[in-house]
Amino acid sequence: MRRWLRFNALSVVMFSAFVLFIVLQSVFGWHTQNAELADHGRAVQSYLRYLGSGDFVESVFENWESEFLQMASYVWLTAFVLQRGSPESQPLGGADDDPERQRRPGSPWPVRRGGLALKLYSNSLTILLAGLFLVSFVLHLLGGTAAYNESQALHGGQPVHFWQFLANSEFWFQSMQNWQSEFMSVGVLVVAGIFLRQRGSSQSKKVAEPHAKTGG
């Protein structure tokens, strides 16, 4: 077990932090929602009911949507867009990453298979992240529609269909406020990595390397 934890510590820490923070988000969101219901003279809802509410679904997936958009775009763009001096960039001279020439007995099955399997596998990370973005986008839209209608019911307004909420500026405001921050943070990482270092991190250049060194 110790050996397994040592070799998988990064993913264990990341997913443990995810579970902790999403539980805390749900608890604080539940209390906030019930306070709003009480202010309007409505009965409070149970924790389990809140987990299925539009308010919670919207709050989760509007953030997931932006995260997966950022990661999908970043993985795809770094395949061919360069930034001199950044460890996040491909080397300026390019790199030989032709899987056909790098095939060996221990290579993943699609590499050994070739053809369409190799083509899909060669882009599988971007495909996965883009798919998760689309799923999150749809769930944000559906959860946002439900949350909007819940708010409309509290204030005596009329409910809307999801396609009407898609055309609502509130939906796009929610998306844009997250999208812009994701691309800004990645831009900061790309540029700051040219001049700054973190010893021991795979996301940083070696401390003694010159600023012009490009690539990890």
Image (spheres, rainbow, N blue to C red):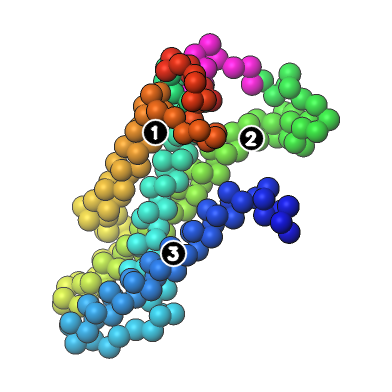
Closer to the chain start, of discs 2 and 3, is 3
Closer to the chain start, of discs 2 and 1, is 2
Q: Mark 2 is on which residue type?
A: Leu
Q: Residues within 10 Å of mark 1 (few under 14, many from 20)?
A: some
Q: Residue furthest top?
A: 93
Q: Which mark is residue 189?
A: 1
Residue at mark 3: 22
Residue range highlighted in magenta: 89-97
Residue at mark 2: 120
Instruction: Please name the residue shown 44% across and 35% down the image.
Output: 73
Asked if the stretch drawn in magenta spans residue 92, the answer is yes
Q: Position of residue 114 (x, y in %)?
A: 74, 28
193 to 60, vertically: above or below = above
74 to 68, vertically: above or below = above
Quadrant position of the N terminus in the picture? bottom right
Q: Residues within 10 Å of mark 3 (few under 14, many from 20)?
A: few
Asked if the stretch drawn in magenta spans residue 50, the answer is no
